[in-house]
Amino acid sequence: MITLEGITKVYRAGEVEVPALKGVSLHIPEGEFVAIMGPSGSGKSTLMNVIGCLDQPTEGRYILDGYDVSALTDDQLAWIRNRKIGFVFQSFNLIPRVSAAHNVEMPLIYAGDSVQRRERAMAALESVGLLDRAGHLPNELSGGQQQRVAVARALVTDPAILLADEPTGNLDTESSLEILKLLRDLNQQGRTIVLITHEADIAAFAQRVVRLRDGVIVSDERQALAAELVR
Amino acid sequence: MSIIEGLRLAVNGLLSNRLRSGLTMLGILIGVSAVILLVGVGNGASVAVQQQIQSLGSNLLTVFPSNARGAGGVQQGFGTGSTLTLDDVKAIANRQSSPDVVTAIPSAGGRAQLTFGNQNWNSSLTGTTEDFPSVRNYPLASGQFFTAGDVDASSKVAVIGQTVVTNLFSGEDPIGQVIKINRQSFRVIGVLAQKGSSGGFNNQDDVVVVPITAAWNYLLGGRGRNVQQIYVEATSAEATSAATTEVTQVLLDRHHISDPAQADFQILSQQDVLNSASQTTGVLTLMLGAIAGISLVVGGIGIMNIMLVTVTERTREIGIRKAIGARRRDILMQFLIESMFLAGLGGALGILVGFGLSRILPLAVSSLPTPIISMPSVFMAFGISVGIGLFFGLYPANRAARLRPIEALRYE
Ligand SMILES: Nc1ncnc2c1ncn2[C@@H]1O[C@H](COP(=O)(O)OP(=O)(O)O)[C@@H](O)[C@H]1O
Ligand SMILES: [Mg+2]
């Protein structure tokens, strides 16, 4: 599903060059639940931006679902993001001016998909248990609810991959647990999930933990489903 | 993303900041209503001038004396010479030599002080002959015009216009009354019908008309027996150019001039006057439109300004939209539709306000010609305001569309 080969990313801040990724190779097969762990500044978000086609790597090859991403144009990348990837961000990133339902519907609007758009948005909201909040604006919802709306938005185009960058970073323990269970359920339905975190007990929900330090992978191990214990 | 979706987004965006949207729209509104109003005033003025000129008769020719373009090559203005005589008038009116001429009348005059009882009025005096009402298109309201006999006898009789009636007589019938013209007693024998000239230009109802002989003898002292102008009535508007040729030939013969370039007179047809007047009013309309257009451009810059602020404010939103699959063109459309909608709505309201003002303003300022608003100019104003939204929205929208998703997402 996801294949990274020798990915490097160098940020240029004026004259200074900051190498954020220094040759990352990684394969994530379909249906896997992978946690990417590492201390702050280790390059996790940079990696997620590359995997999510939000940013192009400086060097290296990235194959996503058979597409060589480095060869695609801006509009093709937008299409990939729309159809193949669902994003969940630490800071929710909902559009504050429009209702929860409209937020969830938005990827379908850009997909040019007008068939039963509202119904599909409602179904996605229902799957995260927020059907009764459809008409609310984001600032009328709690943090946990906002993140669930974000998950619904990520799901609505039925993407193969869900990318979550510290999705619980702004949430209390209870809401965090809800989101993580949601992600685990989605994985059990066959979706590939990449979860970025710096907390070990959150990584425990994943089947595989990849550790990153200073832009390189330092360990990559499968783990027993510790999350079963949490239940 | 469909247009309807874009419109929904635009309305949503504009409503989320009502005051700002309203003020920005006001800029376009003022510009468009100024264009509508001022161009309407220009058109109104042009129509008023044309009507006034046409009311003189479209088959009218005017002959002015002029100094010949002599060896010095200096040509002087209209009416500076004194080369026309009453005999010239009679020769022109002769149907043998000029078959396309109905008749011709002389004209000599100036300003005159009128008195009746204790009323005073300063008016425009014209000395002429009995054919004045038909040549100059002045029907009589009451009484009669003076006759050829009056001209021969230089009778002290006068025919006055409506403005003079209003200002000299308070209610009584002017016919038969004796008024003083420059301290000479004249009997009023007729009143001209109202010409209804609109404000600003020569008031054609503020006239007093007397036999040209009486004017020479009693009123225009010391200026000899000059004819200042000859008015020639052609058989029709189409015949004016043929009549011009004939009159030219008659006068050249009579003045013993062989080279037409040396002519000591000039002939102006009403068509010439109309043409130069429409040219002038056309320039006036254009200038008024241009001045109003400037305010429209200022309104457009206001839109650009606000759209730039909006794009900056929504940087993060743009990042989110791009992350979930918006293409450049989707973002471009969103902001273009928003600025076009803003400008278009401002334009539509501006048209309404412009219409309203053009109804109200003439009531408040009576000297203003009644504005004439043409439908094409309304559609054009609307089109231009939408175009301004497009033009001034393009840069901000393009800036939004070019934002890179990660940078936009990081924006606080
Ligand atoms: N836009 C940027 N410009 C310059 N340096 C950056 C930029 N984004 C990230 N970095 C640097 O790259 C490194 C990795 O950052 P990041 O991927 O955000 O780490 P993490 O998400 O693991 O905390 C850090 O040293 C960070 O300062
Ligand atoms: Mg990070």
Image: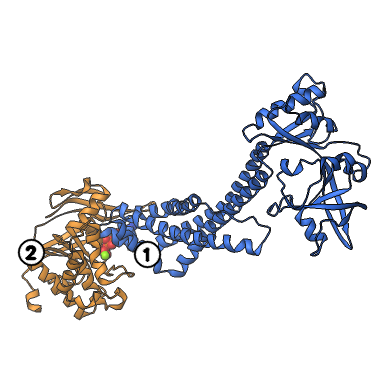
Q: Which of B280 and B44 is in front in this view?
A: B44
In the orientation shown, which residue stands out farthest toward the top?
A: B258
Q: Distance between the residues labelled 1 and 2?
A: 40 Å
Q: Name the residue under label 2.
A: A190
In the orientation shown, which residue stands out farthest toward the bottom?
A: A174
Check if mark 1's residue and mark 2's residue have beta carbons within 8 Å.
Answer: no
Q: Few, some or many C-alpha atoms within 10 Å of disc 2 (few <14, some 14-19, many ≥20)? A: some
The image quadrant where one finds the C terminus of chain A is: bottom left
Q: Where is residue B301 in the image (x, y as percent from the top left)?
A: 50, 55
Q: Position of residue B285 (x, y in %)?
A: 60, 48
> Within the displayed image, which quadrant is ligand 1 positioned in?
bottom left
Q: Name the residue under label 1.
A: B11
Q: Which residue is drawn at 72% across and 50% down?
A: B201
Asked where in the image residue B50 lies, by quadrant, the reply is top right
Q: Residue at x 9, y 58 (%)?
A: A30
Please state which amino acid type lies under the numbered disc 1: Val
Q: Nearer the viewer, residue B338 or B173?
A: B173
- For the colour orange, the matching chain is A
Chain for numbered disc 1: B
Q: Nearer the viewer, residue B343 or B81?
A: B81
Q: Chain B is drawn in which colour?
A: blue
Q: Few, some or many C-alpha atoms within 10 Å of disc 1 (few <14, some 14-19, many ≥20)? A: some
Disc 1 is placed on an element classified as helix
Disc 2 is placed on an element classified as loop
